[in-house]
Image: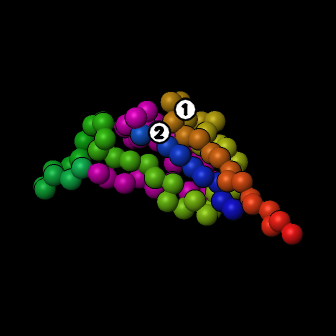
Amino acid sequence: MYPKIDIDYEKCTTPFDCNKCLQICPQAVFDLNTLKYVRLKETDKKEPGAYKVTPIYRDRCSGCNDCVDVCPLQAITLSYPEVKKNES
């Protein structure tokens, strides 16, 4: 089972301000998505909610917790789903 990666988007509103989780992740689990598009205009990197960090490659996550440790906003949490045992 892969770790569950949750990002609190109420805390992480301008990911370009720090970009630390994207830089530190040795497995490149995270992707940065543009949420706001305005035709013929560059999206403002400082505008809250214009970009979003997404753990798109969760299957690559090794559970090292580097992203959790480096996040200055404590916006990232990792959890591990319980493995159900077969009852015989």
Which residue is rendered at x = 41% and y = 40% of the image?
9
Which residue is rendered at x = 34% and y = 46% of the image?
51
Q: Give the residue pinned by disc 2.
A: 8
CB under 8 Å between callouts 1 and 2? yes
List x then y, in percent, for residue 25.
Answer: 60, 50
How far apart are labels 1 and 2 at the CA level? 8 Å
Q: Secondary structure at mark 2?
A: loop
Q: Is 21 placed left or right of 69 in the picture?
A: left
List x then y, in percent, for residue 61.
Answer: 64, 57
In the foreground, 15 or 74 = 74
Q: Residue furthest bottom?
A: 88
Q: Residue furthest right?
A: 88
Quadrant placement of the N terminus: bottom right
Q: Is residue 23 visible?
A: no
List x then y, in percent, for residue 8.
Answer: 47, 39
Q: Secondary structure at mark 1?
A: loop
Residues shaded magenta: 10-35
- Mark 1 vs mark 2, foreground winner is 2
